[in-house]
Image (cartoon, coloured by chain):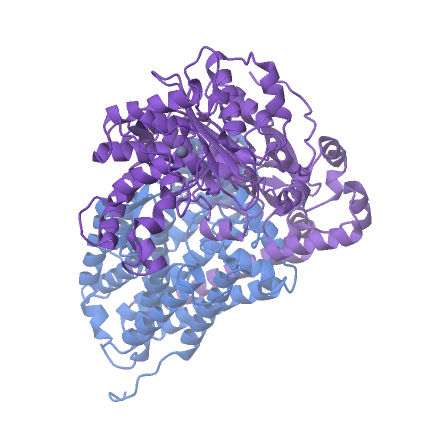
Amino acid sequence: MSNKYADRNRVVKTIFIVTGALFIVRLAMLQLFDPKYRELAEQQSLRPVTQYPARGFIYDRHGELLVHNEAIYDLMVIPRMVKGLDTNYFCDAVGITRDDFDARMKKARTYSPYSPSIFMKQISKEEYARWQNKAFRFKGFYISQRTLRIYDRPIAAQVLGYVGEVDQADLDRDPYYRMGDYIGKSGLEKSYEEVLRGVKGKKIMHVDALNREIGPYQNGALDTLPIEGCNLYTTLDADLQQYAEELMANKRGCVVAIEPSSGEVLAMVSAPCYDPNLLVGRIRGDNYRALNANIAKPMQNRALMEQYPPGSIFKVAQAVVALDLGVIQPNTGFVCDKSLVGCHNHPSAQTVPDAIKMSCNPYFYQVYRRVIQQNHDKSANRDSQYGLTVWHDYMLRFGFGKQLDIDLPKGGMASGNIPDTSFYNRWYGRRRWNFRTIYSNSIGQGEVAVVPLQMANLAATVANRGYYITPHMVRFYGPDSVRDERYTTRNETGIGRQHFEVAIRGMYGAVHEPGGTGHRADVPGLDVCGKTGTAENKGNDHSVFIAFAPRENPQIALAVYVENAAGGGGSWAAPIAGLLIERYINGEVKRKDVERQYREAAPCQKLPLPPHKAKKSKKKRQ
Amino acid sequence: MNPIERKKYDWLAIGLYLGIVIFGWLNIYSACYDPEHAAIFDLTLQHGRQLLWIAMALVLAIVILNVEPRFFADTSYIIYLVVIALLVLTLFIGNETNGGKSWIKIGSFKLQSSEFAKFATALAIAKYISAIDIDIAKFRTKATAIAIAAIPAGLILLQHDTGSALVFASFILPMFREGTSGMVLIVGLVAVVLFVLALLINKYVLIGIVAACCLFYLFVWLNKRTRRNYTNILAVFVVAVAFIFSVDMVFNHVLESHQRERIEVLLGKREDLLGAGYNVHQSKIAIGSGGFVGKGFLRGTVTKANFVPEQDTDFIFCTVGEEWGFLGSGLLIAAYVVLLVHLVSMAERQRSTFARFYGYSVASILFFHLMVNVGMVLGLLPVIGIPLPFFSYGGSSLLAFTFLLFIFIRQDADKNQLL
Ligand SMILES: [Zn+2]
């Protein structure tokens, strides 16, 4: 039997015991007799360094740089790694008080004791240089570099938007973001956030006892490179934008200019304007509060967020709808009967172009009556229901009564209002309303409400004789020049081209013929077509003007809206529109006196805005 | 001899097993501890999943303890063949890690077939050796036993899992107990020493030392110098010299570059604290900083900051060293040694060769894992990735080690019944 080898179990047991003893001796060497490892453990640390990709630049339609980045430095802390800190010395070095230090430390620790968070934002280059010399004394602290948005021209603040620190909602929504990250908060910065931001990279550095980086952790096996953000090539014309902002200075209101053939927005101004650089860097907090508290709401993009009664510009749309329905003919005339609705003194309109030119209210009362009461039903109320439904359909095809799908943030964007039957049923009760109840819509008052972008889109639709391309702010982005499919298709109104020509004869007359309401928009040598509007308001009325030029192959269509500007659309909005058209088509404005008059005019009380920041350098990037 | 004697489970072995498993889980929990997600039972985290594996392992243990002991002896070869088939299957449908296919994905569970090959091979060799007409002294017997171990080892090597393949060398110990010559152990030891010295010192100096040893043995140690002795010593000398010269060749051409680097780091020929030497350096820092009583449960800093890679699997011992100190890690080593020595004693009290051989296999396999894993973590052996039995994170290894141990405890419970 093999039991004669039973004694060999002692050999095996000895091997086991000796190995175990060897390990315990080794453990004793490491843990009890060699202080080296304890020191090493205390000295070394890992430092995750987020590598922020450069945010994409923003250009105007001619390739002029509108937004770029500049380097800034954040002071970071990993609370768990802060050891042996001479707090007073530290506070002196970075220039904060002891209380401030405690508050910041507490905030960082609450976020996470193990992960880095921003201790002090955007320290200056000088502070950064000072820091470099003392860094070794402040274990657990380090500098992280990132970039700041710089706006090359102080224009288009509401369109470009601004970037700000992520809030809790952003953190909850998208795990990409970490506390202290920056995100587009409004405008293009927000709507193109994912295009502009790129993808963050991560680097893990090994740090020694002197707080110096000694090399990448695990030779960079866990590191990822950042991917740069894409550049945006916008549709804006920076010169036109700046000029429009200058003209809108001291006023409240907005300007939207569109290239009709492409739907590209050339300028979008919301006055009062402010310098977008106000919302950059350390000064942002104070400026943000000041702007936010201003009752003129400068941060709001009025062109998208405000809805106004359109006033008489609405008559253009009524005319083409009635012509398309066949309820009037181009040479239909109506007496200016002021007992129906108020009007100014003018000869009665004999044709549709005349009525548009002179902006006769009773005329469009009659036109709207024929649209709403088409004698489909004996009951006036039921008949009006049918007519309103037909009309409502037409209006939606103009892009009214719904949000236009522009590439700016949809939050807060107004959709305007085009009342339908259910709207009036709710309002007055079923079949308790008819044309007589709703006739104000005919002249752009009553229940209709329109967003300025929709007004400019109306001008573009008329300029195109019947269709529009959804207005948009970005032509293409990124190295591959990505274009958005939404902005290449025509939205047809379904109304015949010839009907638009009739309306255009009226819009041309309004600017060029005697008795026209918009002659102040006239630019010598250009056949500007336009329509004035005055929207009733509790205070001073609003002044509106839509226009396009040239009459054939229009290059620009626009809407100008000036709030509380007494004197009607002809007196404020029309001349501003004329100047903008002159500037865009001719490249310069010859009528300096007109320019000066409207630039300086202040129709409403001036409101204090934060001072514009003095630009450090005006140099443009190559 | 009482045929109706009741089963007597070895509670010392079971107790040590439970103790090590629970202590292991505490350390996995600590290694993955994140103060922001401190939930204990969270299947998205390692410690949560390990809790599930432990529950499954305990169920498995109870099932094994209630199976007829003959069952494993009778089905040894079948189990072995099933596992071999599984290893072959892994080569084809396995999931790739580190360039080798070693996992089969079953749902979300990754089955590591190599873990199960160990107890299956132990059963198969035990069965073969215990056959009545077997004579361990015959070359044929030894060759067959080696082949039974070599087949799974070879297949695992094809999975690029060198560590697990090396485990099959453990069977040298049970074979030694059954009567093969102890020379294997001595020759193996000498070979390792020569290999290391050949890498460290000049080869001619080393040959001189070997020559001196041979002469010393011949003229001082031996009293009778026969002609046979002369030729034997000469043969040993020639083989040793050939071995020394082949070391470079093996080192540079047979080993893979990462294995070369690890050996160089171990021998101090390469200082690369951020590269190949990183793991062990950090591991030594973590353990060394633990001191006598350790930093306390969940209080480790080196392991918490994730300095040590794979700190929940192959480097789990770091957490023990850092948080429980010399006291905790020393006691853990002691617990393992007590279990191992006790397993040998248990094996010796078996009445069947099958059970005895299997018992020795269990002890040897566990010993090999302990030696290689802890030796690696303590910087005594090159980095070879194999888990610490019952302790490291991983479902396959915990279940397989539970199989291994409890089959033997079951055999032992019925040792007084004649098989
Ligand atoms: Zn009139």
Along the line of sight, which residue is nearer the eye, A223 or A272?
Answer: A272
Residue B367, picture quadrant: bottom left
Q: In the image, is B203 to the left or to the right of B408? A: right
Split into quadrants, the picture shows ligand 1 in the one at: top left
The chain letter corresponding to purple is: A
Residue B12, image x and y in percent? 44, 77
Along the line of sight, which residue is nearer the eye, B396 or A62?
Answer: A62
Q: In the image, is B359 to the left or to the right of A305? A: left
Residue B279, image x and y in percent? 52, 45
Residue A264, picture quadrant: top left
Residue B314, image x and y in percent? 45, 53
Determine if residue B210 is in view: no
Identify the image quadrant of the C terminus of chain A: top right
Along the line of sight, which residue is nearer the eye, A249 or B254?
Answer: A249
Q: How many marks?
A: 0
Determine if residue B99 is in view: yes
Residue A118, image x and y in percent? 63, 45
The chain letter corresponding to blue is: B
Which residue does the image show at 17% across and 62% down from the upper left? B78
Which residue does the image show at 23% across and 28% down from the upper left? A496
Along the line of sight, which residue is nearer the eye, A539 or B138?
Answer: A539
Identify the image quadrant of the N terminus of chain A: bottom left
Residue A610, picture quadrant: top right
